[in-house]
Image (cartoon, rainbow, N blue to C red):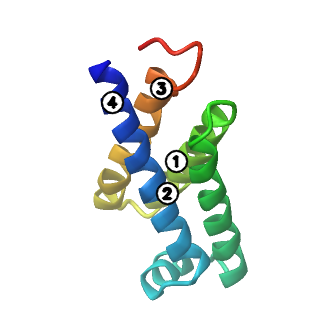
Amino acid sequence: MILKIINSLLILVAVFMGFKQGWAMFSGKPEMVEMFSKWNFSKTALMVNGAVTIVAALLILFPKTFVYGNFLMAAGILLIICLHLSDKDLKGVAIELPFLLLNLVIIYLQHPLSKNSMI
């Protein structure tokens, strides 16, 4: 029971962070534009990336789309990690790594409302 509560909180954190970052990308916040422009992302590409991140965050909420949402979110984070690595920016990688691990942990723990949940 305690593990389900912890997992639910982790899911809420992942959804909140995904939605927050996705909205920042979609709306073209200056810090997002600056970061992604160094990797030659256009405003449109940044908006699409933000929209996919928001959709991924919403998919995590539902048991039937939980894995797909986490996969999309993890893929987006992995893309950013790879781009940081191509710039040899280990600080950027270190910032993104906990968010990737968060998605992997909540996939392992499964959705708390799923009938197949391990916890």
Q: Secondary structure at mark 2?
A: helix
User: Distance from label 2 to label 4 (Cα)?
Assistant: 20 Å
Name which of mark 2 and mark 4 comes first in the sequence.
4
Q: Quadrant of the N terminus?
A: top left
Where is mark 4, residue-wise?
5
Residue at horizontal 43 percent and vertical 57 percent from the top? 16
Amino acid type, callout 2 = Gly
Question: Where 105 falls versus 97 (above or below)?
Answer: above
User: Distance from label 1 to label 2 (Cα)?
Assistant: 14 Å
Residue at horizontal 42 percent and vertical 82 percent from the top? 31
Task: Identify the disc placed on residue 112.
Answer: 3
Q: Nearer the viewer, mark 1 or mark 2?
A: 2
- Which is more toward the observer, 70 or 89? 70
Name which of mark 1 and mark 2 comes first in the sequence.
2
Q: Quadrant of the C terminus?
A: top left
Question: How many marks on residues?
Answer: 4
Where is mark 2, residue-wise?
18
- Which is more toward the observer, 11 or 84? 11
Q: Nearer the viewer, mark 2 or mark 3?
A: 3
Residue at horizontal 57 percent and vertical 39 percent from the top? 70
Query: Quadrant of residue 84 in the image?
Result: bottom left
Q: Secondary structure at mark 1?
A: helix
Question: Where 114 falls versus 79 (above or below)?
Answer: above
- Which is more toward the observer, 85 or 18? 18
Amino acid type, callout 4 = Ile
Where is mark 1, residue-wise?
78
Name which of mark 1 and mark 4 comes first in the sequence.
4
Amino acid type, callout 3 = Pro
Quick check: 61 left or right of 98? right
